[in-house]
Image (cartoon, rainbow, N blue to C red):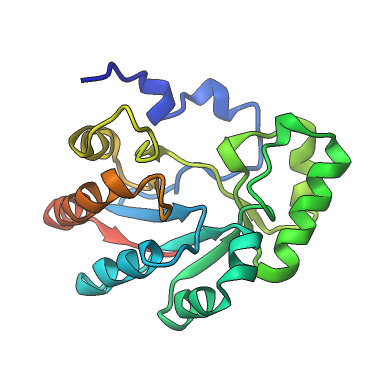
Amino acid sequence: MKKRSRWEVQPPKWIRMFYPGTFWRGDVEDKVVYLTFDDGPVPEVTEWVCKELEKRNIKATFFCVGENVTRYPGLFRMLKDKGHGTGSHTYNHLPAWKCSGNEYLENVDKGNDVIGSDLFRPPHGQLYPWQVAALKKRFGKIVMWDVLSKDYDRQLTAEEVFENVRRNVRPGSVIVFHDSAKAWPRLEKALPRTLDHLLKEGYRFEVL
């Protein structure tokens, strides 16, 4: 079993303070969680995720990559038709720390031209603090996370992905999974188990 760094799964308060005005966790006392998926829509994987959610009458929020939306517009319409929330995740999953500020914002705008959402999540959680103000002029809410499942990590097992969520979830948690081919080997087993566990524990799911 790979040793997990707790802050990778649940960012500490001091990191969150670098990005004032961003949304990491809901301010609630009830057992409410916000289930989110990044990087789709992707054929087969996104459809499978929707079926698993539908089985349990759960709605989630999907942070989509604009390039994928352009390639698979039918999958994007499906998410909306099924009542799930959608957010923007740039046009081609561009990390903010690997390009100029103008290039990044142009990519953000290009992505949201096809997604059309008031929600944004930066790929890899990468942002320069000064970019928050620029993004807040474009979006109503910049969404980060409270629990990162790390389902994309090939060194983890599905059991470890499930445990990342089980051990760290709390009222108001924004939970991240990925509807991507990279995450699929772990997602296939970890997601159903996670959903059933959270329902058994009395959590209810809300769309952002």
Along the line of sight, the residue nearer the viewer: 137 or 186 = 186
Q: Position of residue 152 (x, y in %)?
A: 40, 39
Horizontally, residue 135 falls left or right of residue 168, namely right
95 lies above or below 51: above
- Residue drawn where x is 20% and y is 52% of the image: 198
* Quadrant that contains the N terminus: top left
Residue lying farthest right?
Answer: 102
Total marks in image: 0
Q: Position of residue 48 (x, y in %)?
A: 31, 66
**Image quadrant where residue 50 sits:** bottom left
Along the line of sight, the residue nearer the viewer: 160 or 36 = 160
**Image quadrant where residue 7 sits:** top left
Residue lying farthest left?
Answer: 200
- Residue 116 visible? The answer is no
Horizontally, residue 190 falls left or right of residue 103, namely left
- Residue drawn where x is 67% and y is 37% of the image: 95
- Residue drawn where x is 54% and y is 21% of the image: 14
Horizontally, residue 192 falls left or right of residue 10, namely left
Q: Position of residue 73 (x, y in %)?
A: 58, 76
- Residue 47 visible? The answer is yes
- Residue drawn where x is 31% and y is 20% of the image: 4
**Image quadrant where residue 44 sits:** bottom left
Q: Position of residue 131 (x, y in %)?
A: 78, 38
Horizontally, residue 25 falls left or right of residue 191, namely right
Along the line of sight, the residue nearer the viewer: 94 or 120 = 94
Along the line of sight, the residue nearer the viewer: 174 or 115 = 115
